[in-house]
Amino acid sequence: MKFKYTIIAVTIAASLNNFKAHAQADIKDAFKFATGQTDVMLTETAAAKAKANNAKLVEPRNLDNNGNLHIVNAGDWCSGFFPGWLWYLYEYTGDKKWLTEAQTYSSFIESEKNNTGTHDLGFEIYCSFGNGYRLTKDPAYKEVIIQAAKSLSKRFNPTVGAIRSWGAIGQPKFTVIVDNMMNLEMLFEATRLSGDSSFYKIAVTHANTTIKNHFRADNSSYHVVNYDQETGKVIEKVTAQGYANESAWARGQAWGLYGYTTCYRETKDKVYLEQAEKIAHFILYNPELPKDLIPYWDYNVPDKAVQSRDASAGAIAASALLELSTYSKANSKLYTAAANKIIANLKGYQPAPGEGKGFLLLHSTGSAPAHSEVDVPIIYADYYYLEALIRKQRLHDHQSVVKQ
């Protein structure tokens, strides 16, 4: 088995120079495709809104099994990804058209800054207003981020040492999902913007609790850990969106990789760097990882010939690996090469230009056990794909992979 792992690693590393040679042309072509698709998406979204005749439906999320565009309200956990997609187009192209669209679609979800009923404010607000503030320094966006951090912080329980994911504040069973690692970046930013260190302390405490309780000996992660909110004791560990409780749900592994890479950036605590590297190695050295490095929806699901892939897990991992490559001296080339290979192979997951209602990637999987969003385009796959392309360009230009 170790021999197979070594072959996978060597194959990835050996491809590094080939990807470097074509980096700029590939990125330019990818954004040319993305801008054309975005025009289609804007048209299709407007049509879907008109058909629904519901002013609360504001952002695209996915295609249903009949190929219809599904749009959602501001409170949907995916509402921030399309605004973020538009901000990335503006960042790459400098075209004020995309600035205007990004501002408009961000404005649709500003009210979420006050939502204490969800842990997904990082996805909703930071992917939209976070990118908006990074690119414009609009003081109004700064205040949105700080307020969203205040709202998210109300879900933190110091006894558990974590931010509640699912369920209302006060419920006895305190649920934490690995996805919640993605919301910590907004808290770190809020401390930087406000000078209030409480946000930073909550983020670090949550990250430490997650390391302690979410990960197995092989460095894979459970999806869900339930705690007793009065004592902080672990009640159960399950994998709700994966194949089985002890299996490795693919997107969950990518969330963890991305989350701990971010935590290292923000704290410089080597514990987080080591955790990110452990997760990266679980992914890249996994014998169940396909040759194109785009995983099935769960690494342990049997009968893979009839199972769906998860392009979103690939895109999230690629973006994280590009950043991680700048922190890890020993594995920098491996991580860069793996990310570039994922990005290149995701081209094979694209619809034909003008098709797919404007989505960039096909073949993502939301929750296979719930028969929800299986083998369809999903908005967060496109968001992290564009982020990975931006990071690849910045790495090529010898700039910081993450622009703050």
Image: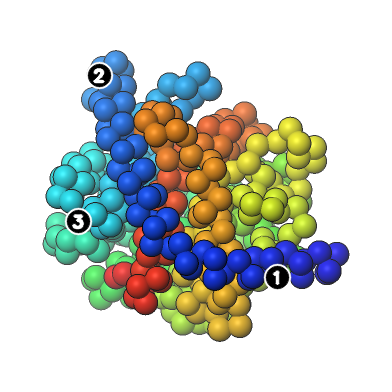
Q: Disc 1 and disc 2: Cα gap in Å?
A: 52 Å
Q: Amino acid at mark 3?
A: Gly
Q: Disc 3 and disc 1: Cα gap in Å?
A: 38 Å
Ranked by sequence position, the earlier of labels 1 and 2 is 1
* Residue of label 1: 10
Element type where label 3 sits in the image: loop
- Above or below for 395 versus 381: below
Element type where label 2 sits in the image: helix
Taking the spot 63% from the left edge, 70% from the top edge, the residue there is 13
Taking the spot 14% from the left edge, 62% from the top edge, the residue there is 139
Residue 299 percent coordinates (x, y): 72, 50
Taking the spot 63% from the left edge, 41% from the top edge, the residue there is 309
* Quadrant assignment for the C terminus: bottom left
Q: Amino acid at mark 2?
A: Ala
Ranked by sequence position, the earlier of labels 3 and 1 is 1
Mark 3 in CB contact with mark 2 (< 8 angstroms):
no
* Residue of label 2: 50
The disc at residue 237 is: none
Colour option used? rainbow
Q: Amino acid at mark 1?
A: Val
* Residue of label 3: 94
Q: Is residue 255 left or right of residue 61?
A: right
When asked about the image quadrant of residue 304, the answer is top right
Q: Nearer the viewer, mark 3 or mark 1?
A: 1
Label 3 packing within 10 angstroms: few (<14), some (14-19), many (20+): few
Element type where label 1 sits in the image: helix
Residue 84 percent coordinates (x, y): 32, 50
Q: Is residue 284 left or right of residue 180?
A: right
